[in-house]
Image (cartoon, rainbow, N blue to C red):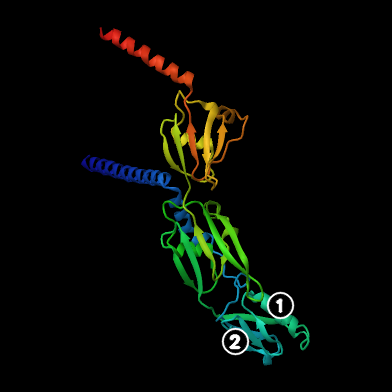
Amino acid sequence: MYKNLWKAIIIVICLVGSYSCADRSLHSNLRHAYVSSRSSPSEQLNLKLSQSKITLKRPFSMVDYKIGPEDLLEINVFQAEEFKTLVRVTSEGYIKFPMVGKIKAAGMSVSELEDYLSKKLEKYIVEPVVSVFVKEYRSQQITVLGAVKNPQVYTVTGQKYLVDVLSMAGGLTEDAGDICVIQKVIQEESGEIQGVQKIVIDLRDLLINGNSTLNIPLSSGDVVHVPKRGVFFVDGAVNNPGSFPIEGKMTLVQAISMAKGLKYEADKSSITIYRDTGKPERELITVNYDDIISGKKTDIFIQDKDIIIVPKSGVKNFLKGFVNTIRGFISFGKSL
């Protein structure tokens, strides 16, 4: 009898302990989910950035890499040992190759140099097969600016991609936006600068959606700039006027929602957006809120430094004051 009683007590203790552990695990999971849901857009992007080192990792590709000054190249021609060459690219970007002479190699990819040499050697060899291998990579300087934790000029070797460089810069700051602007210098074959190409990358598409095509290769001289998140202002007949960050593509309806919605006395037919266009005077955009809600008009996207003013309706304001006055008389009557 006592043996059975002790067995029952032990079973109860074990069950209570297992439920307690499960309960703690459940609370831990819920707490983790709550913290995740409360994280800022930049924190979400940083989390994905740390994960993307693996998921968006692109294998090193000679196709992407551009040969530059001080690179050490090993050049071989199939079944033609006399053409085997180990040559360092000069500071001006040139190399010398037997039977071909001086070549502007800097700025070419490995495959482009292979094709170029193959065509030049056709005079001497039937269907030449040329292989180029970079034995030593030069030091490349890539600049990272803006809303990153460690903005500076980074010296790197080998082929680097956008995710690599953002990780090297310590990730994004709290006020970082969700786009990245990459500035690339375009050079002619002579080495002269032809112009500057700007590439805008959607960081949410890259990191959150995992669009690996946006993880573009970077080269020496590139400048990566992460602008700060935009800010807009809401004032007037809203429940919570103030300044708010632009998160992704935000519309007027979403902006009003962030300001806790419209007050009763708001004039929905003449909401005004004062837009900064870089000129001394702002552009004025008048919007009918009800037309947007009903689908008659398209919602408007909010831009950086927009000021949204929601005016009061004269009739509604009068009615609200009248109602408050009546309530005051009723309260006064009751107190008598």
- Judged from this view, the residue extending furthest toward the bottom is 82
Tell me the quarter of the image containing the N terminus. Answer: top left
Amino acid type of the residue that numbered disc 2 sits on in the rendered structure: Val
User: Label 1: which residue?
Assistant: 115
- Judged from this view, the residue extending furthest toward the front is 280
State whether residue 97 is above or below residue 289.
Answer: below
Q: Position of residue 57 (x, y in %)?
A: 53, 63
Q: Residue at x 50, y 59 (%)?
A: 225
Q: Which sits in the foreground, 222 or 31?
A: 222
Q: State how far apart marks 1 and 2 are (Cα).
A: 18 Å
User: Label 2: which residue?
Assistant: 87
Of labels 1 and 2, earlier in sequence is 2
Q: Residue at x 50, y 37 (%)?
A: 254
Q: Position of residue 52 (x, y in %)?
A: 50, 59
Amino acid type of the residue that numbered disc 1 sits on in the rendered structure: Asp
Proximity of marks 1 and 2: CB atoms separated by less than 8 Å? no
- Judged from this view, the residue extending furthest toward the left is 2
Q: Position of residue 320 (x, y in %)?
A: 42, 18
State whether residue 244 is above or below residue 206.
Answer: above
Q: Secondary structure at mark 1?
A: helix
Tell me the quarter of the image containing the C terminus. Answer: top left
Q: Secondary structure at mark 2?
A: strand
- Residue 265 lies left or right of residue 325; in this view the side is right
Q: Residues within 10 Å of mark 2 (few under 14, many from 20)?
A: some
Q: Residue at x 55, y 37 (%)?
A: 284
